[in-house]
Amino acid sequence: MGYLHKVSDLSALEPGQKPGEWLPYEAGFDKTPHVFCANRAYDACNWLLDPEEQAQGPYCFACQFNRTIPDLNDPKNLERWRKIEIAKHRLFHALIRLRLPLISRREDPENGLAFDFLDDGPDGSSPVMTGHDNGLITLAVREADDDQREHMRVEMGEYYRTLLGHFRHEVGHYYWNVLIRDGGRLESCRAVFGDDRIDYQKALEAHYANPPSDSWRETHVSVYAASHPWEDFAETWAHYLHIVSTLETAWLYGIAIAPRTPESAQYSSPALSADPYLELGFDEIMNAWLPLSMAVNSLNRSMGLQDFYPFVLTPAIRHKLAFIHEVIRETQAKL
């Protein structure tokens, strides 16, 4: 099996005439010879390159955005990197399905998208901070260790902390640059999320010195979103990706929700009839998400696990999600 990013799907393969060549069974490919990404040698990627892509280098569409990977001489780092790549490739699947622009650092050295996966210094010195800087997303590889990530989740008072969540949040900053700052939407975005010209460092310092009261729950999807409009946008962007990506899975499995309760009509939803990434309207997405998230939360509780989506989407938060939905739909319409 191999993933074909141009159709966003896995395909069965048969060996080609030359060693290392594979012929996809996916319709429309006429069994054109493909090769696996070079990172398959590390069991870190299952994406394929067509002949045109092979002429540009040995890395697939997703892996070419890597600028720095962990030092694989450290035996722990190979497993960490594999986990990181699973999350990053799932992110790229969503961004491709949403038909969002993806400009690499090679194409735009100053603002293009790139990833640095970095380890802390010896004995924990010089700890790496996960973050974003003009398209460069840095991820601390310790986040791939479940115990470290859970420790940080509890220490930061977060409901949710995953590698995929980090990627979805940080790429939200990248798309704020691309679709808001450079897309002529600054004023409309400020009307929804607030004035981003507020000093960012001072806002973060004030946020951690005096965390907001529970009033943030009415207007922000997380407490961190209340720290600054940039973080509010990135957190809301991440949640939009959480929602549409999960709904895509439900759509492909034909999942319908019909609980046996007196309020069943209120909490029911038929199987989705259209692609959440491209076709559903915002109200349709929200109407599908509420019963699905309630059902899966209940399933998790039956297994003694945390809620899979422990968030409440108030009208104010839904308004912010709707803004992101419209920006994405406008971007798709221009293709």
Image (cartoon, helix red, strand yellow):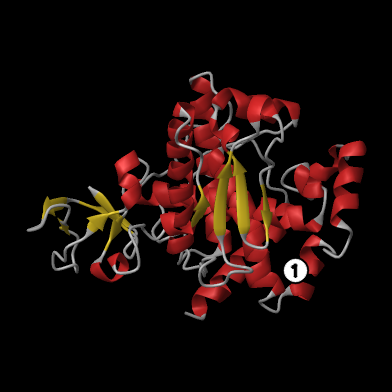
Asked if residue 263 is positioned above or below residue 63 in the image, the reply reads above
How many numbered circles are shown? Answer: 1
Q: Quick one: which residue is furthest to the top in this view? A: 304
**Which residue appears at 44% of the width and 49% of the height?**
90
Q: Position of 38 compared to 145: left or right? A: left
Q: Amino acid at mark 1?
A: Cys
**Where residue 68 sits in the image (x, y, percent)?**
53, 49
Residue 267 appears in the figure: no
**Where residue 239 sits in the image (x, y, percent)?**
61, 50
**Which residue appears at 47% of the width and 35% of the height?**
259
Task: Describe the element under mark 1 as helix, strand or loop.
Answer: helix
**Residue 193 occupies which quadrant of the picture?**
bottom right
**Residue 199 occupies which quadrant of the picture?**
bottom right
Q: Which residue is mark 1?
A: 189
**Where residue 262 sits in the image (x, y, percent)?**
55, 34
Q: Callout 1 environment at 10 Å: few (<14), some (14 to 19), or many (20+)?
A: many
Q: Position of 303 compared to 206: left or right? A: left
Q: Nearer the viewer, residue 285 or 195?
A: 195
Asked if residue 247 is positioned above or below residue 72 in the image, the reply reads below
Asked if residue 229 is positioned above or below residue 292 in the image, the reply reads below
**Which residue appears at 28% of the width and 56% of the height?**
48
**Which residue appears at 43% of the width and 31% of the height?**
79
Residue 234 appears in the figure: yes
